[in-house]
Every structure is written in C-alpha cells, then in structure tokens.
Image: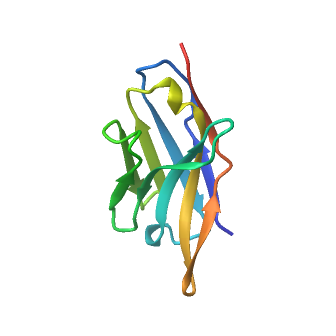
Amino acid sequence: QVQLVESGGGLVQPGGSLRLSCAASGTIFSANAMGWYRQAPGKERELVARISSVGTTLYARSVRGRSTIARDNAENTVYLEMNSLKFEDTAVYHCNAEVREGFGIRQFWGQGTQVTVSS
C-alpha cells in the first residue's frame, strides 16, 4: 500500500518561504511521477507542481518563478520550496504519486498539510 506523509506546513508571513516534504513508502518511488496539489476553502484542488520520474518539472502559472519542486530518490521524498508567499497561497497542500499499475496509472494522495499565509 502506497503511503504519502506530508510535513512542513504552518503559518508564514507574506513574502516568507517554506519547504514542504512528502515521504513515500510502499512503492518504487523512483519510477513514479510526483506532484503537489493544493485546495483552498471553497475552491477545487489544483496542481501546484509536478516532477516526472526523470526530473522534468511543471509548475502552475501562479507559482512559477517562486517555487521549486525536487525529489530525492534515495530518501523516497519529494519537496516543494515556495518563496515570496502570498495570501492566496493559503491552502491545504497534498502530495500526489502517479503509480503505474499494469497499463494504467493509479493516483495516491497524502492527507495534506496546512499552509497559512497571514500577517
């Protein structure tokens, strides 16, 4: 069973920075694309950043240029560093794993970590 455990959320002032971590178990981590999504109150879950198994990255326009997603395959961990945080970055951030099963891909999700940007 794939398990994803996020950490690193909290209260941050506007303009501040944070780094989220997601530790994965129960899967061949290096073979999976990994991603970070977020969901703000009253809004749909949206992609923040994604990194493929070979390190290709993709960012939402809203965070591009001030966020970095990275993976450490030796530690089975994916990170999201965010800088210049804005009020609108407040959300629950969820880690996502895209795990190949047969000819398809199955999505797994972590429980999420709250990020609150407030002065």
- What residue is drawn where x is 49% and y is 67%? 29
Question: x%, y% of residue 59?
Answer: 38, 49
Question: x%, y% of residue 86?
Answer: 46, 25
- Residue 100 is left or right of residue 42, and the answer is left
- Residue 111 is left or right of residue 95, and the answer is right
Who is closer to the viewer here, 83 or 65?
65
Residue 11, above or below 65: above
- Residue 13 is left or right of residue 57, and the answer is right
Question: x%, y% of residue 81?
Answer: 41, 39
- What residue is drawn where x is 42% and y is 27%? 17
Looking at this view, name the residue that lies furthest to the top: 119
Question: x%, y% of residue 118?
Answer: 55, 18
- What residue is drawn where x is 54% and y is 87%? 103
Residue 93, above or below 90: below
- Residue 42 is left or right of residue 82, and the answer is right
Residue 81, above or below 72: above
- What residue is drawn where x is 62% and y is 50%? 5
Q: Is residue 76 visible?
A: no
- Count every numbered label the image shows and give the total: 0
Q: Is residue 69 visible?
A: yes
